[in-house]
Each structure stands twice: as structure tokens, then as C-alpha cells.
Image: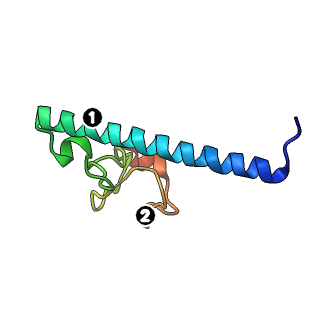
Amino acid sequence: MTSTYQDLLARKAELEAQIAAAQAERKAEGIAQARALIGEYGLKDADVFPAQGKKPKGSVGAPKYRDPATGATWTGRGKPPNWINGKDRHSMLID
């Protein structure tokens, strides 16, 4: 059985419509289940969707170097601060 190009395109359109309908149905079921769980457990937005974009304080890393003159610290990541540029870093390591 040889299908023409137009027949294949028509079948593709039918399948895409069926897929879209099935996705919409599954989405509606998922929303209903989520709402039921939220109502049952009294969940809030923050319980389900924690704040985005804010890193916890201290997540940069522990400081590895300390400026003996000012007490400023640097983790060793990123661009080195001016107080350590051109100096022996070994002498500024934090134990």
C-alpha cells in the first residue's frame, strides 16, 4: 500500500490533534491531583516552589586567604582581589 505525500500529511495532522487532546487531558488530571494534595495537606506556594535566584548566604565557599593588614578574605575563586595580586599567596593561607 503506497501512501501519497498528501495522505501522510493528513495522517500526521490527525495524530498531532490526538496528541494535543491527550496532553490536555493528562494536564487537567495532573492539575486536579495537585490541587487535591495542596488542599489535603494545606500546602503554600513556598512549600511547593521554593524561592528562586537567591543563594544561601555562605554558598560561595569558605575563605582560603586572609589579608593580614585588613583581615579581608578571599575564597580563591574568581578574580583575585588587589590586596593579593603580585604577592606570595602561601603566606596568606588560612589554616
SS state under label 1: helix
Residue 95 visible, this angle: no
Q: Give coordinates of residue 40: x percent, y percent.
A: 13, 32
Q: In this figure, what is the number of numbered marks?
A: 2
Rounded to the nearest whole Å, what is the CA distance between mark 2 and mark 1? Answer: 52 Å
Q: Give coordinates of residue 46: x percent, y percent.
A: 19, 47
Considering depth in this image, is 38 or 91 the residue closer to the camera? Answer: 38
Residue at horizontal 47 percent and vertical 51 percent from the top: 89
Residue that mark 2 sits on = 81
Mark positioned earlier in the residue sequence (2 or 1): 1
Q: With 13 as the anchor, is 87 left or right in this view? A: left
Residue that mark 1 sits on = 33
Considering depth in this image, is 93 or 79 the residue closer to the camera? Answer: 79
Considering depth in this image, is 8 or 39 the residue closer to the camera? Answer: 8
SS state under label 2: loop
Disc 1 packing (10 Å; few <14; some 14–19; many ≥20): few
Q: With 87 as the anchor, is 73 left or right in this view? A: left
Could you tell me if the residues under marks 2 and 1 are in contact, i.e. CB atoms within 8 Å? no
Residue at horizontal 78 percent and vertical 49 percent from the top: 7
Residue at horizontal 87 percent and vertical 34 percent from the top: 1
Q: Amino acid at mark 1?
A: Gln
Q: Amino acid at mark 2?
A: Pro
Q: With 68 as the anchor, is 88 left or right in this view? A: right
